[in-house]
Image (tube, rainbow, N blue to C red):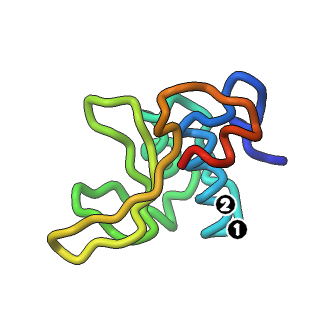
């Protein structure tokens, strides 16, 4: 596993989920290893030719919470409604088995 967050003490965290979901969507590491509010900046630094920072949602984008330490993936945006996938909805670090169901 290349997921930096795939380790005891980080299972179930939003970073663990977002890294894995990004890998499922794109097939490579997003390049982030920091706190969730740092993920977008680290993603752009790792892949400046593929991603840009924007305040407008876009399907497939990674979002980092502004003023809130959280990260997730934008699945859809129709100009009014946004659909996201995110982890750590119970607000806890979990076992691996628990974490797989917490999104």
Neighbour tally class for label 1: few under 14, some 14-19, many 20 plus, Cα within 10 Å: few
Q: Quadrant of residue 98?
A: top right
Q: As displayed, is residue 20 above or below residue 26?
A: above
Q: Residue at x 61, y 26 (%)?
A: 93
Residue sticking out furthest to the left: 80
Along the viewing direction, whichever of 37 and 81 lies nearer the viewer: 81
Determine the secondary structure under disc 1: loop
**56 on left or right of 52:** left
Secondary structure under the numbered disc 2 in the rendered image: helix
Q: Quadrant of residue 7?
A: top right
Question: What x and y, as percent, mark residue 21?
Answer: 61, 58
Compared with 16, 103 (above or below) is: below
- Report the label total: 2
Tell which residue pokes out farthest to the bottom in this image.
78
Position of 70 with respect to 5 (left or right) is: left
Left of 83 or right of it: where is 27?
right
Residue pictured at 74% horizontal, 44% vertical: 3
Q: Residue furthest right?
A: 1
Query: Could you tell me if the residues under marks 2 and 1 are in contact, i.e. CB atoms within 8 Å?
Result: yes
Residue 52 falls in image quadrant: bottom left
Residue at horizontal 59 percent and vertical 42 percent from the top:
32
Name the residue beneath numbered marker 2: 23
* Residue nearest the viewer, comparing 60 with 86: 86
Q: Residue under label 1, please give it.
A: 27
Asked if 52 appears above or below 4 in the picture, the reply is: below
Q: Which mark is residue 4?
A: none
Which is more toward the observer, 24 or 39? 24
**How far across and down, in percent of the image, does residue 1 sit?**
84, 47
Residue visible at 15% across and 70% down? 80
């Amino acid at each position: 596993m290349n997921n930096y967050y795939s380790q005891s003490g980080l299972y179930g965290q939003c970073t663990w989920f977002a890294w894995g979901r990004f890998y499922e969507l794109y097939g490579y590491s997003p390049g982030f290893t920091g706190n969730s509010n740092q993920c977008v900046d680290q993603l752009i630094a790792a892949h400046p030719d593929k991603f840009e920072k924007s305040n407008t949602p876009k399907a497939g984008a990674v979002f980092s919470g502004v003023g809130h330490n959280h990260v997730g993936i934008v699945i859809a945006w129709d100009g009014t409604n946004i659909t996201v996938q995110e982890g750590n909805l119970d607000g806890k670090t979990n076992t691996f088995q628990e974490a797989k169901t917490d999104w």
